[in-house]
Image (cartoon, helix red, strand yellow):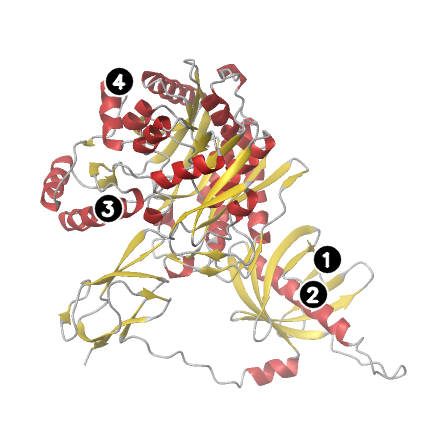
Amino acid sequence: MFKKILIANRGEIACRVIKTARKMGIKTVAVYSDTDKDALHVEMADEAVHIGAAPAAQSYLLIDKIIDACKQTGAEAVHPGYGFLSENPKFAIALEKAGIKFIGPNIKAIEVMGDKIESKKFANEAKVSTVPGYLGVIETPEEAVKIAGEIGYPVMIKASAGGGGKGMRIAWSESEVAEGFASSMSEAKSSFGDDRVFIEKFVTNPRHIEIQLVGDKHGNAIYVVERECSIQRRNQKVIEEAPSPFLDEATRKAMGEQSVALAKAVQYESAGTVEFIVDQDRNFYFLEMNTRLQVEHPVTELITGIDLVEQMIRVAYGEELKIKQSDVKIKGWAIESRIYAEDPYRNFLPSTGRLVRYQPPAEGTENGLTIRNDTGVYEGGEISLFYDPMIAKLCTHGPDRKSAIEHMSVALDKFRIEGIQHNIPFLGAIMEHPRFMEGRLTTGFIAEEFPDGFHGVPLSDTRMNVLSTVAVYMNKIHADRAVMISGQLPNRPRRLPTDWVVSINDWTVKASAIRNEMGVEVSLLDADDKVMSTHFVESEWVPGEFVFHGFVDGKPIVVQLERAKEGYQLKYRGASAHAVVRTKTAHALNLLMPEKVAPDTSKFLLCPMPGLVKSIAVEAGQDVKAGQTLAVVEAMKMENILRAERDGKVAKIECAAGDSLAVDAVIMEFDFG
């Protein structure tokens, strides 16, 4: 077996590979850019080599630097992770010439299947059903418009060397094709060093289901069940699960056998994935083959017990696959939630900065339920604008889909992140969504269920009562501690009221709290002080803790909290609420306070997220129309086009192409006079 391997990647996937290598007794080498010098994967590896500046094109995409790092450290093999050089045949060829093993498939498979255009041609020749489209390289926007018209709208514009949703656009008209073509090429160039794109028919209401493969150098290949990856936003997977709630055994077998046949046709070895579009009648169409490890591989590992990274390493070393198709069994259900550094309340714009708090739920198995958290960050670390915004992949496993979903909801409630914005509230909302819970999924789920974006989860009466009860409980604990302050006279103990007024956002209810040796009894009262409901709270929570763990009426409850200027900001099941508990007198006085009016920023174009200004499309003094492109800002390898919201004139431009801006920095000022 290899004695030392190098991981040509960063973040959570580098940490993931290191864990398996360590388990196998293999030493590891990390590579890092300027920005990543203090990264978790660098700390975890046995050795680390600096390879360049922060931009990937000046570090992680430099083949010579990776090979030099192998030679410096004596690494015998390279695991590429996903993204970066993982599907670059030039990288595999360079490693072969240097006498270094590539922990991935053979060069032919990478060349044929790693290129989305060539893979579709190959699949057609192999009689595999594919989505209608144009498989040649498209040179100009005019040519793209012509081809799209021939295929029929809607169409998907995709980067040939792409992955992870980068360089992908859905177009419904000629203008969207022309604009999407340019953006796809630009993103593809910056992300993969290859600006080729192609166009195919976009199948409406599809499911995205993929088959995991493992093959060896001895002609053996198996499929390791499927993953449902239909919950996507902007073509980027958000939630994955295994198995799929949609497939029956016959369809699973047909998709698996077709995937294995395709793999054997290219003599595929290592772990890889065949992706399919599946319509509502369970007809499936080959989409692409990823000749690498997938981001969502943990859910397959959780339901099968197979360590896919270990299999990749053993296959690369030349071992024969010991797992037979009959050995692959489905055990329970697994869900993966991708936790991203993005603001779901501002159209999921990227968020960068320092992780002031990073406290994920504890990993492990208890009562048949498992939590796994694949991550590459730590508390105090920094989320950089140069790389993918993923913070962690939170996974849960249970005996069935319902238990895995419920456990995920609890795990998300426990996951505490501060310092940057993140999408945990949105993930929590999906877990609670009736359509998701029923398994009625398509790749359009998010666009259909959140057509106007995400604005938080509305609180039902039941949950409003739960949060009110928790708020009153915490207030009671604070009050009880206050009466213990030193300096009081023994015969004149300080007494605090037991009746309060609870405000949750704009909702108000009266409450009382009585403590006994078992816990606190909280009663919610109507305007006439009549009891509407009574709840019993048990918890060991103490002031200063930022996660409330306890039981309300015997049901386990986890609520995150942050101290607000007054009261608490509570987070529960994707909802966020401002809770304040006051005495009756304080509540009456608060009603007399004037409301603070937000400043008027309507005449400014503000930068919606931290990013790099790629271009300014207008000039000072220029008249602009609603919908007109004003600027393009890039963050985390994604280009964001900023448009005019209404007609007006550009009065002043405050930045230039190449400037790095903070969130809400002024880009330009308008005159709407």
Are the residues at dot 2 and dot 1 in contact (C-beta closer than 8 Å)? yes
> How far is the residue under mark 1 from the one under mark 4?
62 Å
Amino acid type of disc 1? Answer: Ser
Q: Nearer the viewer, mark 3 or mark 1?
A: 3
| Nearer-N-terminus badge (3/1) | 3
Instruction: Pinpoint residue 489: horizontal percent, then vertical percent.
Output: 87, 84
What crowding class fits label 3: few (fewer than 14 Cα within 10 Å), some (14-19), or many (20 or more)?
Answer: many
Are the residues at dot 3 and dot 1 in contact (C-beta closer than 8 Å)? no
Amino acid type of disc 4? Answer: Ala
Q: Which residue is mark 2?
A: 473
**Left or right of residue 95: residue 668:** left
What crowding class fits label 4: few (fewer than 14 Cα within 10 Å), some (14-19), or many (20 or more)?
Answer: few
Decide which of 638, 583 is in the foreground and name it.
638
Q: Secondary structure at mark 4?
A: loop
Q: Quadrant of residue 71?
A: top left
| Nearer-N-terminus badge (4/2) | 4
Label disc, if present, on residue 442 of the rendered structure: none
Q: Nearer the viewer, mark 3 or mark 2?
A: 3
Label disc, if present, on residue 184 of the rendered structure: 3
Spot the residue most to the right.
491
Task: Report whether residue 359 is seen.
Answer: yes
Label disc, if present, on residue 539 of the rendered structure: 1
Q: Which residue is mark 4?
A: 126
What crowding class fits label 2: few (fewer than 14 Cα within 10 Å), some (14-19), or many (20 or more)?
Answer: many
Q: Quadrant of residue 579?
A: bottom right
Amino acid type of disc 3? Answer: Ser
**Which residue is located at x 61 percent, y 49 percent?**
361
| Nearer-N-terminus badge (2/1) | 2
**Which residue is located at x 53 percent, y 25 percent?**
330
Spot the residue most to the front.
72
Q: Is residue 499 above or below residue 100?
A: below
Q: Nearer the viewer, mark 4 or mark 2?
A: 4
